[in-house]
Amino acid sequence: MLNFNYLVSTRVFFGRESLQNLGNEIKECGERVLFVSGQGSIKKTGLYDEIIDIFHQNGFSYDELSGVQPNPRISLVRKGVDLCRKEKIDCILAVGGGSVIDTAKTIATGFYHEGDPWELFVLGDASVKKALPVGTVLTFAGTGSEMNGNAVISNEETREKLAIHKDILRPRFSILDPTYTFSVSKHQTAAGTVDIFSHVLEQYFSPTREAFIQDRLSEGLLRTCIQYGPVALTAPSDYEARAQLMWASSIALNGLLGYGRVSDWATHGIEHALSAMYDVTHGVGLAILTPFWMEHVLGDETVGKFLEYAKYVWGIKGNNHQTVAKRGIERTREFFTSLGMPQRLRDVGVDQNALMTMAQKAVVHGTLGKFKKLGVQDVFTILENAY
Ligand code: NZQ
Ligand code: ZN
């Protein structure tokens, strides 16, 4: 196990009716609130009205920034920063999924940055120094943004999608009521489940061999996705399934699995290049790419980890290491397909001629990934195979 410094500063209110904590939590952060939301799902479910009522009951003054799109854009972040400065906002409330939360986090730190907020993504994590407090009401299980310090934003002009990571971006509080995810569509539920699954894999396939506790926790989370993803698809209002997925989303990427070992993140790097260029749903891109990444990195030196994965996650037994490892990969592909995810890049409108550009965008620092280092040519091969 490697050394680490573990801080998870988000207060989590989990369960039915946990929205009753919202008023007190906002009071701790200030009086003037920026209410950030997406493209209308919270109006349809009635959550919007409930939140406005809480604002009125507590006498908060608020401004609204709605219309956050999936694969959120820097242009809306700029608007949010201007609004916060003009209205002297004290804190930001994000109500939605990862896109809304990431927009809120970026506005929160953009508020203190003198230049354009996109500079933070180009300059990197060291440029993220201060942020307004952010609270969240989560309506979609997947990214883990509700408990982590990451924000992922797309620049529609440069067709880049970049991330920042800093503990000060962790939400001050997050309200996790699984009933708010009952209305998430089948397709989006499947994409969110794949995203959780992928976050675990990115940390599980690690070059750090001594990580017993992290590995066994990871396998538990993967099995949770396998158990409850299909239930949430067929019975969208199954509380237990939604609750298991929601908590899995948060712990898959709040640091618990990653601290003490080196993580990979190659598949995410490739997917971010894909969704920057083609606006593909994040979980859909991961569902297509993950099995092809696995096939590409499977070799004599990596087969041991694939054996663990096949055995403890899928219950596959056998004496031939390569056969067992390949069966584990196949089960992964079958699981994603059973959730309704496509298998090929050509199915999501990607142009084959764009694969090299995508590979170059994914490999910005010479190599990508830590479990097995990938160069541009490796990534291009994965993309070609996935096409
Ligand atoms: O905009 P609305 O109308 O709310 O609709 C959203 C959106 O269309 C809808 N939705 C959300 N809650 C709903 C609902 N529909 C019905 N009922 C509800 N309760 O779902 C759609 C997708 O929402 P979005 O927020 O885009 O999904 P997700 O949470 O998957 O976020 C994806 C973004 O997060 C980034 C991804 O790259 C992508 O940009 N990621 C962020 C990470 C992080 N901050 O740690 C890590 C991830 O790996 C990921 O990269
Ligand atoms: Zn992800």
Image: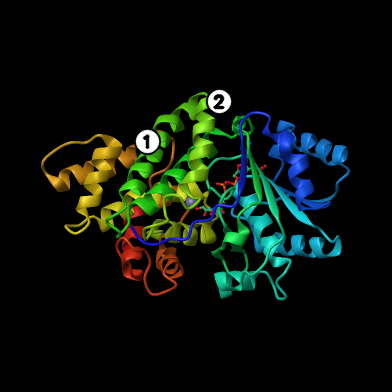
Query: Does the image show residue 261?
Result: yes
Could you say which quadrant of the image residue 224 lies in?
A: top left
Dot 2: element: helix
Q: Is residue 131 left or right of residue 197?
A: right
Residue at the image point whose x is 54% and y is 37% from the top: 246
Dot 1: element: helix
Confirm if mark 2 falls within 8 A of ligand 1.
no
**Can you give x and y, in whole percent of width and height, for residue 222 in the image?**
38, 40
How much space separates mark 1 and mark 2, taking CA atoms?
A: 18 Å
Q: Which residue is mark 1?
A: 223
Q: Residues within 10 Å of mark 2 (few under 14, many from 20)?
A: some
The disc labelled 2 sits on which kind of residue?
Tyr
**Of 7 and 339, the residue lying toward us:** 7
The answer to whether 42 is drawn above or below residue 145 in the figure is: above
Q: Is residue 159 left or right of residue 377?
A: right
Q: Residues within 10 Å of mark 1 (few under 14, many from 20)?
A: some
Confirm if mark 1 falls within 8 A of ligand 2.
no
**Of 126 and 256, the residue lying toward us:** 256
Which is nearer the N-term, disc 1 or disc 2? 1
**Can you give x and y, in whole percent of width and height, for residue 284 in the image?**
47, 46
